[in-house]
Amino acid sequence: PQPIRLEDYTPPAWLVESVHLDVALAPSRTRVRATMRVLPNPDAAAGTPLTLDGERMTLLLVSVDGAKLDAGAYDLTDSSLVLPHLTEGTHEIVIETECDPQANTSLTGLYQSNGVYCTQCEAEGFRRITYFPDRPDVLAVYTVRLEGDAAACPVLLANGNCVESGTLEGGRHFAVWHDPHPKPSYLFAMVAGDLAHVSDSFTTRSGREVALGIYVEHGKEDRTAYAMDALKRSMKWDEDAFGREYDLDVFNIVAVSDFNMGAMENKGLNVFNDKYILVRPDTATDVDFANVEAIIAHEYFHNWSGNRVTCRDWFQLCLKEGLTVFRDQEFTSDMRSRPVKRIADVKTLRAHQFPEDAGPLAHPVRPTSYIEINNFYTATVYEKGAEVVRMLKAIVGEDAFCAGMDIYFSRNDGRAATVEDFLDAMAEASGRDLSQFKRWYDQAGTPDLVVSGRYSPLDETYELTVAQSTAPTPGQSQKAPLHIPLTMGLIGTDGEDLGLYLAGETSEDGATERTLELTQHEQVFTFEKVPSPPVLSLLRGFSAPVKLTTNGGEKDWLFRMAHDSDPCARWEAGQTYARELLVAVTRAIAAGEKPRRGTRYADALRNVLTDDSLEPAFAAMMLDLPGEAELAQHIGQDVDADAVHAARSHLHKAVADQLGDLLLDRYAQLQSNAAYSPDADQAGRRALKNACLRVYAGLGNENAARLAATQFASANNMTDTEAALATLTHMARDERQAAFDSFYERASGDPLLLDKWFSLQAMSSREDTLARAMELAKHKDFSLTRPNTVRALVGVFAGANPVRFHAADGSGYRFLTAFVRELDPINPQVAARLLGTLKTWRVYDAPRRDAARQAVSDLLSAGKLSEDTYEIATRMIA
Ligand code: DPP
Ligand code: ZN
């Protein structure tokens, strides 16, 4: 397959003014008649024949201006339809096609999920519905007439407003939807089926009344209240925070059970993976509730950052995704706890994006080439993309950022924009030169910052030397320095922040925190009027997605775990300390020496547990040891996954030993009889309570098992149920089996609960987990056609169980690649994404590396793969 390159971008030769789709739904033979007004693009080279994208359809008819074309008058291939004689003028084209939604397991284009017709067009699914210039810079006005069986499909939905509906002969009926906003084809959607419906309304700040609807399977209506509430709060927040108002009379959401992504922002008709809509206290955890809130917000915010202002081409994906993730993170910060949200996002970034940026799949936030764009819906485009927007805000400041957003939205409304358009708006609003900053979009890899501080008592100065570098990534051996905002403070011996006076600056305000701007390989900053040796607090609020090394040590970490005024830096001090301890323990175990027990670290956690001034959710995060995957990444080469697991278990147990009774006390104190609410305060208290249980369970003894089993038996909400199972799953005790059996019975007939049952077993560190996973892949409740279930079992095993997945004999890798091979013909997108979980293989030791490389080579030579999986497999071992 030929890669597509950013540098080859050319404007579309033809534009589409309007599309009228007539869709006659039938399970295996759905007919689509598309009537389009097309005209040559005045901004493109003239004389190019009309070329339309299309695949996996049967072409029934083509006509131009009312005259049917003979087969000889067009060129049809597997992926396109060319009208060689059509090179100029405005025309009406009619195309009739037929497709088979029932057989469509790829879940892109038009497909059926549990009997419900739905579509997924991003990135290139519309070309499976009709022949069309399926690219984001062709914006058209759509009218859709849906016709279907009235009994099977009482609900008929598409984008925009419903303008007509009625009954037809033969038990059929129809509805006509019109969307006045020109949009690219990837934002097209239609849904039809027998769905229940919950409605509400929202009045925008200018007084527009918007009808809100959430469509779900019958019987699931009582799991929609939280999503609806989150939607209304999102609509209000975007008005208040960004001045963005909704622009149609209707906003509908449909929840479907088979969906490749989390959700999709189709204009006025969002389609969701039902996992991110359906929550009720007894079926969903606090984390599930928080995900619903965040994803509802994310998709809603796309109405402006994505839909009104869309992307010129798929290389600009971060323009809508990075910005929209930034916006949803801000929303959650305002709805919940800002520091806790920030730390959670840093954890996600470090768990998913840093490894991506350090491995064979590394790519810039704005990639420069792809074979299959679906492979670029990545942590780098989304999460690092959001970090880039956050850094930009830190550099230009809040006011200029807001002004820049206004310019960006108003100047590009109705346009397909680029990263340059976004940066131009920010540069104009701030008066700053952002040309160096732009490298964040073009240069892959996580920068390393090495910082050292030197105090000089004679002249009372503190000198900070900061060096930045970025390791080579595939296709980019040379790296230039980036424009990095480094937010920092200096802490005095009493634990209070010191005033900062930077040498050479005239303003003497002595703020206690400031953002230094790094632009060179190495820079020195000198602070004056520093009365005594300070403790350095760096990367406050995690001001940039970098890896930091400082010359501080245990004493600094302990001090900052107790005193840093910035919660993010305070948490990071604990993580840094734990990482260093874990590395030392790993080495000691390998050398046959007696490993450290982390006494001072445990003491610091004791202080956390007894400090009532701390937010419980924050305390829970302080208690969390860095994960095994993160440690592997930190060690960086020749990692023995078993040694890392042993080291972490050792420290976990040592901490549990030292804090034992205190953990039990706090666990007991945090029990509550209050009625369940998913709000951040209650969720935070549950998080801390369950963290106490988890840490205590490091002892692995009878008492821990009993505690977890009791919690499982008495829990009145899914958060506590799941936490109990997540503790029991690692144990080799009878309580474990009993709890899982009982949970299975309760989950019967409820796919979202069954997925929890799969994933809680897949994450077990027990030695028999791979064998169990293989059994579960044959279980009657497992299905290759349900992405959620595939992710719950195989995705969790490969992505969240490092010790079993990275087994030294390669059995974990072979399980994954065999599974990918089976899934690939059914659902290439999900197969390719699963294979991506192997991306950290190079940090492991030689037997593991050899096994991983072999498993991927075998996959490549075993037969024809989809382009999706082929691209990931070849990059993986390149
Ligand atoms: N639906 C996916 C998202 O919102 C892709 N646009 O991120
Ligand atoms: Zn998005």
Image (cartoon, rainbow, N blue to C red):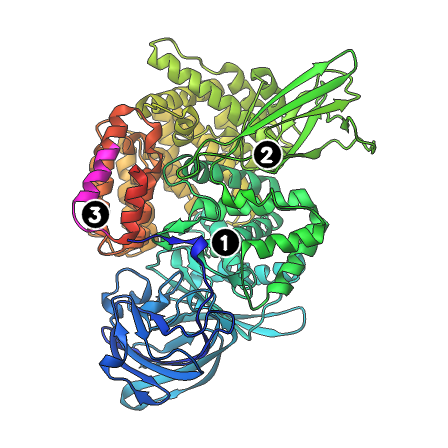
Give the residue pinned by disc 1.
321
- When asked about the image quadrant of residue 46, the answer is bottom left
Give the residue pinned by disc 3.
821
Sequence-earlier tag: 1 or 3: 1
Report if residue 857 is visible in the image: yes
In this picture, residue 684 sits left or right of residue 427: left
Sequence-earlier tag: 1 or 2: 1
The residue range painted magenta reads: 852-865
Q: Quadrant of ligand 1?
A: bottom left
Residue at disc 1, secondary structure: helix
What number is the disc on residue 554?
none
Q: Which quadrant of the rendered structure holds the C terminus?
A: top left
**Badges 3 and 2: C-beta atoms under 8 Å apart?**
no
Question: How far apart are labels 1 and 2 at the CA level?
Answer: 24 Å
Give the residue pinned by disc 2.
568
Q: Is the residue indicated by label 2 positioned so its CB lies within 8 Å of ligand 2?
A: no
Q: Residue 357: percent from the left, percent from the top?
A: 44, 38
**Badges 1 and 3: C-beta atoms under 8 Å apart?**
no
Question: How far apart are labels 1 and 3 at the CA level?
Answer: 30 Å
